[in-house]
Amino acid sequence: MKFHETETFRNLSKAFAGESQARNRYSFFAGVAKNEGYQHIQSVFEATAANEREHAQVFYKLLVAHNQEETQVIHVDADYPLVYKDTLTNLRAAAAGEREEWAEIYTTFGAIAEKEGFADIAKAFQKIAEVEKHHMTRFEHYADGIQNGTLFKKDNPTVWKCSNCGYIHEGLEAPGSCPACAHPQGYFEELPEKY
């Protein structure tokens, strides 16, 4: 059987298209976050978009490497999310999409690739699924922070960093604006480390 006739070829094509679309969605979501004053979440969406671009490239290179010029086109018939709202909604939708990728789609695609004898493709699906799980957790964290009013306010002293100038503040909440560069609160992120 030729590679372009395998289920793995179809799955890689879907994954390439899905990652490409996710990259664009996250870029769009970054603009919404910026407009709503969540500059740090804007950065999170932009960084995740860059990750998704790399995932798309991994899948595309695997398609090309295994294809051996059997076909010059890919056909994709799959469902992809259609969401573009406020930052909270976008974060929840992004988390749901990432959950589906790591918990269902890439796990299944990896098992099929393994069964069809494509160990390198199976490994790529497994490793990228691990990244998608982290993306889901991060999106859920920020969505919970917005929803619960704890994005910039905590019950215990917290170390906050201005992502624009690097100013460090310790307190129960992030400053309304940065004392060093005057950028708004949306530029502050909670730091887990104390150094």
Image (cartoon, rainbow, N blue to C red):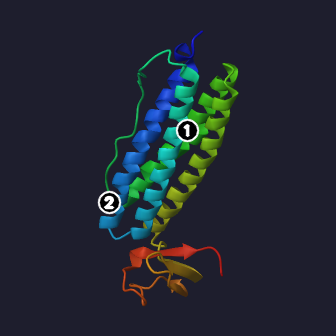
* Mark 2, other Cα within 10 Å: few <14 / some 14–19 / many ≥20: many
Residue 32: assigned label? 2
Above or below, 106 against 83 in this view is above
- Secondary structure, mark 1, is helix
Residue for badge 1? 58
> Nearest the camera: 172 or 15?
15
Quarter of the figure with residue 179: bottom left
Q: Position of residue 94 (x, y in %)?
A: 45, 49
Above or below, 30 against 76 in this view is below
Q: Position of residue 65 (x, y in %)?
A: 57, 27
Residue, x 54% and y 33% (percent of image)?
61
Quarter of the figure with residue 75: top left
Q: Quadrant of the C terminus?
A: bottom right
**How far is mark 2 from mark 1, CA to CA?**
28 Å
> Nearest the camera: 54 or 132?
54
Q: Position of residue 95 (x, y in %)?
A: 49, 50
Residue, x 57% and y 55% (percent of image)?
137
Residue 67: assigned label? none
Q: Amino acid at mark 2?
A: Val
Residue, x 49% and y 54% (percent of image)?
48
